[in-house]
Image: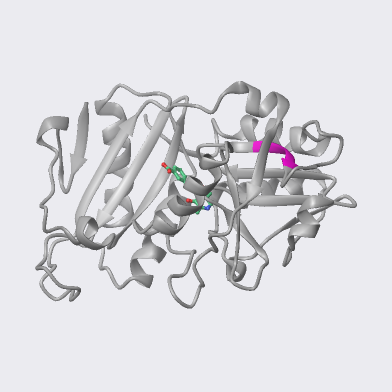
Amino acid sequence: MKIYLNDKLVERSEAKVSVFDHGLLYGDGIFEGIRLYQGCVFKLEEHLERLEYSAKAIMLDLPWTREELSEAVCQTCRANGLQDGYIRLVVTRGEGSLGLSIKNCTSPQLIIIADTIQLYPEEFYQQGLKIITVPTRRCNPAALPPTVKSLNYLNNILAKIEAQHLGYHEAIMLNDQGYVAECTGDNVFVLQKGVLLTPSASAGALKGITRDTVLQIADEIGVPWREANLTRYDVWVAEELFLTGTAAEIIPIVEVDARTIGTGQPGETTSRFLEAFRRRVVSDGTRLD
Ligand code: PXG
């Protein structure tokens, strides 16, 4: 496997960063998770834009242009002979000294890994997923904005651990006001009286690329939508519920906190969104050739 490291492709065994890298020492860095579908890097421009915004928010100057990053992503996919897969683009603050100051971190490190993807079991899509709300709250946007896709995922990992201990794959995380923020690696959508509702970034949601795509599809197929503060009650009584994310795409939810959602089967509108989403993934992005 070839890994892109800083300015060139190297063998996996050669792809190494310093133990003094602030990405490792402090989770000081940012990343993107991107899908490759039939030679098309889905929404690459949007992912790179989000990366640039994340970098700006944490005051990390990216020494690479949008074009250079785009070419590096495509080159990594080509070098690994991939047509379908998962791309992990990571930028760390780079090597520094022990201590929080970023002053000595002069060279951000760019890592691009392109690999095959372990898809979620088909039964998640056919039968829907059962999830729970967990006690761990999503980071307050005034502390670490959830809109920054940072390397600091401990908040989400703690929530995931809580869900898994109880035998669930995913968890709904509330914000510190008790409104739904998002899941550990996915955005949340509720369908209520034919209207699609989703938490806003200020409620603690990442501005997901899949989330944006679903909102575009909603406009196209004529499903009204708006951002809303959602309580657990809103989720429990939803007609339909689904999660969106790069890895998950669109996963129907059929149970939350032991409450059956809708009929207990994946919803009809959810299925329409998933079909429309899967139709566009092969064209809505940057082609490798
Ligand atoms: N919320 C959080 C906290 C996420 O981490 C999403 C929402 C959905 O965003 P996108 O842009 O993917 O629609 C995410 C995305 C991984 C991995 O390897 C995580 C994500 C995406 C891809 C891979 O853990 N999270």
Q: Can residue 185 be seen in this view?
A: no
Residue placed farthest to the front in the image?
A: 166
Q: Position of residue 174 (x, y in %)?
A: 62, 62
The residue shown at (20%, 30%) is: 2
In the picture, measured across the screen, residue 16 lies left or right of residue 160, that is: left
Q: Position of residue 121 (x, y in %)?
A: 57, 24
Query: Is 11 in the magenta?
Result: no
Give 38 or 253, whichever is nearer the viewer: 253
Q: Position of residue 128 (x, y in %)?
A: 70, 31
The residue shown at (72%, 26%) is: 127
Residues in magenta, as a range = 251-255
Q: Position of residue 279 (x, y in %)?
A: 64, 30
Q: Quadrant of residue 221?
A: top right
- Main secondary structure found in the magenta portion: strand
In the picture, measured across the screen, residue 193 lies left or right of residue 35, that is: right
Tell me the quadrant of the picture where the N terminus can be found: top left
For residue 155, above or below residue 240 = below
For residue 81, above or below residue 219 = above
Give 204 or 106, whichever is nearer the viewer: 204
Give 109 or 204, whichever is nearer the viewer: 204
Q: In which quarter of the image is residue 250?
A: top right
The residue shown at (38%, 25%) is: 116
In the picture, measured across the screen, residue 261 lies left or right of residue 249, that is: right
For residue 174, above or below residue 13 = below
Residue placed farthest to the right in the image?
A: 193
In the picture, measured across the screen, residue 153 lies left or right of residue 174, that is: left
Q: Quadrant of residue 74?
A: top left
The residue shown at (57%, 65%) is: 204
Q: Can residue 22 be seen in this view?
A: yes
